[in-house]
Image (tube, grey):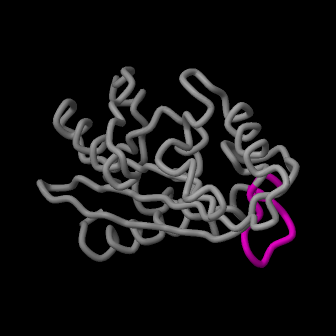
């Protein structure tokens, strides 16, 4: 079974992807290739950051890899936090800090539509490929659930009465933004890459 590196230090993201791809290839994280530094994310778009991370790993470590960037885009906040989702409350902030900032900014706002967007950028055999997953939903007024990570406790996907943080990893993977992008990646690998 061939191995791909997922360019992340986030063990929650790594576990989600490993679960989805366990039957087609072995997925390792940055720690597994002895990459311990923080990879630059200096682009002003989600697509740009994903590409920057994947290309950095390929250039510095010479391994086939893919990277993601994800943003929570809230309609009433003109798409914020967007590309700044992971550090929305400032340098060194926690996911709790980020959620609190969003909830404060959304206080009293009736229009609560939002979407999660994930872009996966794959660097493979001197070529690059991009896969995008989007899930619509709304921002709740209070946190619900203790599973998942990031903004999961305040995001309720369309058609569901539970937040991502109230779902199992398997449930979330079937409908989440990252799950959708990963499904596209898997379909591509099965068709075009001899695993």
Residue 191 image offset from top left, x and y in percent: 29, 76
Image side of residue 7 versus residue 192, left or right: right
Identify the residue shown where x is 53% and y is 60%.
Answer: 178
Question: In the rendered image, is residue 3 in sight?
Answer: no
Residue 36 image offset from top left, x and y in percent: 39, 21
Identify the residue shown where x is 52% and y is 51%.
Answer: 82
Identify the residue shown where x is 44% and y is 38%.
Answer: 8
Image side of residue 85 versus residue 175, left or right: left
Q: Is residue 86 above or below residue 186?
A: above
- Residue that extends furthest to the left in the rendered view of this protein: 126
Please provide the residue range marked out in magenta.
Answer: 155-168
Q: Quadrant of residue 119?
A: bottom left
Along the viewing direction, whichever of 143 and 11 lies nearer the viewer = 143
The quadrant of the picture occupied by the C terminus is: bottom left
- Residue that extends furthest to the front in the rendered view of this protein: 108
The quadrant of the picture occupied by the N terminus is: bottom left
Along the viewing direction, whichever of 32 and 166 lies nearer the viewer = 166
Question: In the rendered image, is residue 124 in sight?
Answer: yes
- Asked if residue 89 lies in the magenta stretch, the reply is no
Image side of residue 137 versus residue 131, left or right: right
Along the viewing direction, whichever of 192 and 42 lies nearer the viewer = 42
Q: Is residue 184 above or below residue 43?
A: below
Task: Report the number of numbered marks.
Answer: 0
- Asked if residue 156 lies in the magenta stretch, the reply is yes
Residue 107 image offset from top left, x and y in percent: 82, 49
Identify the residue shown where x is 73% and y is 74%.
Answer: 158
Q: Quadrant of residue 63?
A: top left
Residue 4 image offset from top left, x and y in percent: 33, 48
Image side of residue 111 versus residue 123, left or right: right
């Amino acid at each position: 079974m061939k191995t791909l590196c997922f360019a992340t230090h986030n063990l929650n993201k790594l576990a989600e992807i490993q679960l989805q791809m366990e039957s087609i290839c072995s997925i390792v994280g940055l720690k597994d290739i002895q990459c311990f530094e923080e990879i630059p994310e200096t682009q002003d778009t989600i697509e740009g950051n994903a590409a920057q991370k994947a290309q950095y790993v390929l250039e510095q470590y010479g391994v086939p890899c893919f990277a993601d960037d994800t943003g929570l885009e809230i309609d009433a906040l003109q798409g914020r936090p967007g590309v700044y989702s992971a550090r929305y409350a400032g340098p060194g902030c926690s996911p709790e800090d980020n959620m609190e900032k969003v909830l404060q900014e959304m206080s009293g706002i009736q229009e609560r539509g939002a979407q999660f967007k994930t872009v996966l950028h794959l660097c493979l055999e001197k070529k690059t490929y991009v896969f995008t997953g989007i899930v619509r939903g709304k921002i709740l007024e209070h946190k619900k659930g203790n599973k998942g990570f990031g903004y999961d406790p305040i995001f309720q996907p369309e058609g569901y009465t539970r937040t991502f943080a109230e779902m199992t990893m398997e449930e979330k993977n079937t409908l989440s933004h990252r799950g959708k992008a990963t499904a596209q990646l898997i379909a591509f690998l099965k068709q075009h890459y001899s695993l």
